[in-house]
Amino acid sequence: MLAACCLSALALVTGGVRARADTVSPDGKVHVTYWDKWISGYEGTAIETTVAAFNHSQARIVVDYYITSQIDRKTIIATAGGDPPDIAGLWAQNVSTFADAEALTPLDSFIEKGGLTKEQWLSRYYPVFARICQHGGHVYAGISTPATMALYWNKTMFREAGLDPDRPPRTLAEFNDDCRRLTRRDPKTGALAQVGFLPQEPGWWPWAFCCWFGGSMFDGHSVTLATNPHNVEAMRWMQGFTSQNGLSDVKTFSSYFGPWASPTAPFFTGKLAMVIQGVWYDGYIAQYKPGLDYGVGPWPEAVPGVRDFGMAEADILTIPRGARNPGAAWEFIKYVNSSNPQARTRDELQGAELLDFLQEKLSPLRVWSPYFAQHHPNAHIAVFRKLAESPHIVCIPDMGTWWEYYREILSAFDKVRLLEATPEQALAYSQERLDESWARYRLSLERHGQAANVAAITPP
Amino acid sequence: MNPHTRLGRFVIYALLVGLSLVFAMPFVWLVSTSLKPIDQTMSLPLTFIPRAYYAEIDGQQREVTLDFTVAQPGVVAEISAGPEAGHRVFLSDDQLARRSADVRVLHRVQPGWWHVTVRINSTRVVHPGEAADPGTAGPAPWDLVPRSSIDSHVRFRWRNYPEALATIGGDPGTPGSAAALNHVSFWVFLANSLTVCVLGVLGTVFSNSIVAYGFARLRWPGRDAFFAVTLATMMVPFPALMVPLYGIFKMLHMVGTLQPLWLPTFFGSAFNIFLMRQFFLTIPEELSEAARIDGCSEWRIFLRVILPLSKPVLVVAALFHFLFAWNDFLGPLLYLSRKQTFTLSLALQSYESQTGGVQWHYLMAASAVTILPVVVLFLFTQRFFVQGIATTGTKG
Amino acid sequence: MNKRERRRLRLGLAFTGLWIVGIGTFTAWPVIASLYYSFCDYSILKAPVWSGLENYRELIHDDLFWKSLRNTLFYAGLSVPLGTVVALSLALLLNCEVRGRSLFRLFFYLPSIVPMVASAMLWLWIFNGQFGLLNWALAPLLAPFGLHPPAWLVDPLWAKPALVIMSLWGVGNAMVIYLAGLQDVPRELYEAASIDGATGWRKFWHVTLPLLAPVIYFNLIMALISSLQIFTQAYIMSEAANGNGTVSDGNPARSTLFYTIYLFTVAFYDLRMGYASAMAYVLFLITVLLTWLATRAARSRLQHLN
């Protein structure tokens, strides 16, 4: 019994001591804890190589990379618990929410200490990526890996359907037409055997389809989900895929889909002929379905006259509030957000270009070095680069309630595609909820003395 | 049904056996999946017993995976011209008719023949640009063969277990690489779980026995009211406590460590107080009286008289808490963010969401490993379990 | 209070001292703090700001709150009665003088002590629409009628029933309790009933059930309280089966958005701890209410039976 008491007391004391992590290690260097989500595979190796390159490039700082899942929730918990990582690799949609929640350290002072103004720093990026980094008039994030999305199509299936495999649909009308011709049923059972396109695969961006049709999510002041008629139009188009093919047929058909990044993904197994996916998809195709004959091209024209519609996302790097080594953390973020613009060999690639070369994605910076532009491993990188440059490219709006907004859109999309509601009904329902939540959010910010954050929203 | 007739007894036994099979079936499926190679977990029709298949490809008897059957007659041919020259394809008869010019027929195929691919026996993730089968260029060789020409025998893939445990904490990578540094060993997860469980058991047994003594063997003003309040706290759902508890542990700088998971056990829990009090009440008062007359303090009576007699209930409380702590998921989810601090339950859940596609055979193997200690514990302590549950449930 | 009583009080408090600290720190304080937070606008990293009844007013208008409540009550409404019936039936079967009773009991009890995470993974796999064990068994049974087995966890209609089925697998705990209760019923009562000419069913209805009633009611209440807090399996299975890689929003179509999951999402993803505290309090009140109602019903029923 006495032993138990002592043991417990000991555990209590040592447990408390163990909770603190040492930052200045015996080797005299500053250790920066960096949490990010990249798991095994080529994306994970790329970040590790970049971290190693940074550690090699100077002698003062060592970045320690930790793979962390559910990183947004864990970062908040750790920050609230007073022991955050020095760098948290979040997603673009976390910037506004986390900044408003006072979970992030603004990067403005670091930029200025480096001799640049905020505008100069941001002008180095493509405008869409510059937008992603800001909130409330401050810079809160650097980009780790950017992505734009394009149309992938299965050339073999095109060929079999009698379509030209090297000519993807150029307009929405052609797209719909091609879908009809690419949809096949089993002659014996009548069940769907292959479908041209299904918006629920991968189903991450119903909002992007709305923007593609000319709609918008947010006009800088209020939610425009149901008020913008193009959004309704887009939802109706998405619903069409289910209503034209039959709800139970589609349900049965999609129950055979494996996850998007696995050998049983529908695009890999000849179930879907076309899919909208990001720049990362090339790598996954090479990993899970080498030899797939596919093409990559721009989005078809949905709004007349807009031929270069695009959508961008990014993984970002932030410094949580209360991080122990913000200065050293900034050095790494700066490294990953700069490059060697004259690199002519593989060894000369640095920073952003090194990381994006290894992850086979595009660079967020406007200027590309000759080696990066000409020897990029992603055969279709030019398509993605062109999309990044387009003036019609969209990204998520700068709203602190975006996470809730996104869940509402997904829920509305689910209802619409399962034929449980008409697009008008589903969007109106979500609009009401989102109006309330946005009003409440603004009230809350005012209450906490953060009204300025709302006034300075980056325009969409 | 009348349990005393022959028919009645037969029906009862039949029902029991049938229901036992139904209840046991998920376990059987768990073990079966955990011993299969990945392709056999996702092949139709479902099989229970993992097998190794062999077929002749390119003149060699190789181990293969069964992929799918073809429904129509056709040929396996090699494309002899054009950009796809050298590729081997399957063509149905009408496709062959259209392309007879640039293909060289290898052999005919009947409906129902199986597409088999040479098995790649590595768990290594293939990187873009790498050959899937090291040693050859391009994708693995395949062929279409009749079912009758495929040999097979039963083979359990025991390797799944060490491989699953090796990867549950992330990709082990090559020694010394950054991935290896990020990798958390299964033993760390096990140690974390055991730490929480053992310390929790110590705390449970220690604190609740003392408190229950106070409620059961002592008479003092306000005792029964306090006990009623104790019982009432069992009704408070954990979510109502979640947010402020989180705040308390944050203040104590314990968020991110294992402490919130076992520290509260040192301060009692309503359920265990109730359990132990029930038991203490059954010990005859005369024993305490005799000790009091002898001049013993209450603490000594507790230590020397009551505790030694209480081994059964202490074991039950220990077992219940061990089980609870071993299985707990919401607690670790709430407080732990760094992978090195994860308990097994959290590690298992993050394992599932790790890669792009779920590797069912590994996941089932890892699940089996977390279940096994519980099963073993139960087999050795059945008696206590049953007794303990009966005491709490029936006297409630 | 005289000296003797004071001495006894001191002794009592000394022994229960740990629990006083425990109940104060880990139960009473959080309950009070929860109440306070529920009237505040509290985001975990900023100080709480009093906002009055705003959270509660919003709760009433929040469609998702009601949906999560409905989902939870639906689940509880199915799993608790079905679970009780299954557990009781198994206990009745085992109570007959069968050989190898402990072996059968092992099969039925083991699933209830398995870690919920492992269980969720296993059932996720069993419910798989294409390669799952359940549909493999059901498909040939339904085929003659021209029906397909459902897609379970990806179908909004069948996701909750799937979780109910999974909960039935874990009734072992309740079964053991009922079995112990059944074995407490004195032999003589059955013999007396037989002499009076009662057959099996009547014996059950008039002897067994009344004596078992308190046990059944107690366990019904416990099962109800615990099913209202369902979290782990829903969290894991809805995220995995419908993985967008994003937070579990009760996919598909929020059919598995249970109360505690919504609470967790609001607290740790939307960072609205005040609102989450209001939800937690409502759950607390509902639990108390249901317990009180059930106890009253039980008491009156028991009096009636006796």
Image (spheres, rainbow, N blue to C red):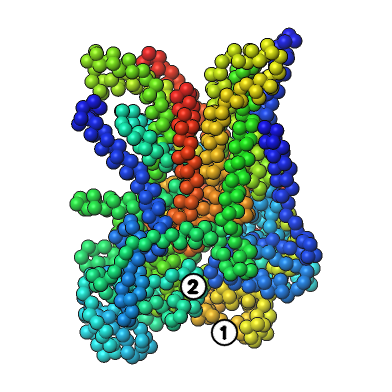
Residue A97 appears at what percent x and percent y? Answer: 62, 55
Query: Which residue is under mark 2?
Result: B126
Provide residue B79's location: percent of width, then percent of height: 32, 86
At x 24% / y 13%, what residue is drawn?
C195
| Residue occupying image coordinates x 32% and y 44% | B21
Q: Quadrant of the N terminus of chain B?
A: top left
Kind of residue at disc 2? Val
Q: Is residue A63 above or below residue B281?
A: below
Q: Indicate the amino acid at tag 1.
A: His
Residue under numbered circle 1? A375
Q: Is residue C216 left or right of residue A162?
A: right
Q: In this rendering, would B383 be left or right of B284? A: left
- Residue at 39%, 38% (x, y): give it: C106
Q: Looking at the picture, tell me which residue is in the foreground, B227 or C264.
A: B227
Q: Position of residue A316 (x, y in %)?
A: 62, 65
Q: Chain of mark 2?
A: B
Q: Secondary structure at mark 2?
A: loop
Closer to us: A19 or A196: A19
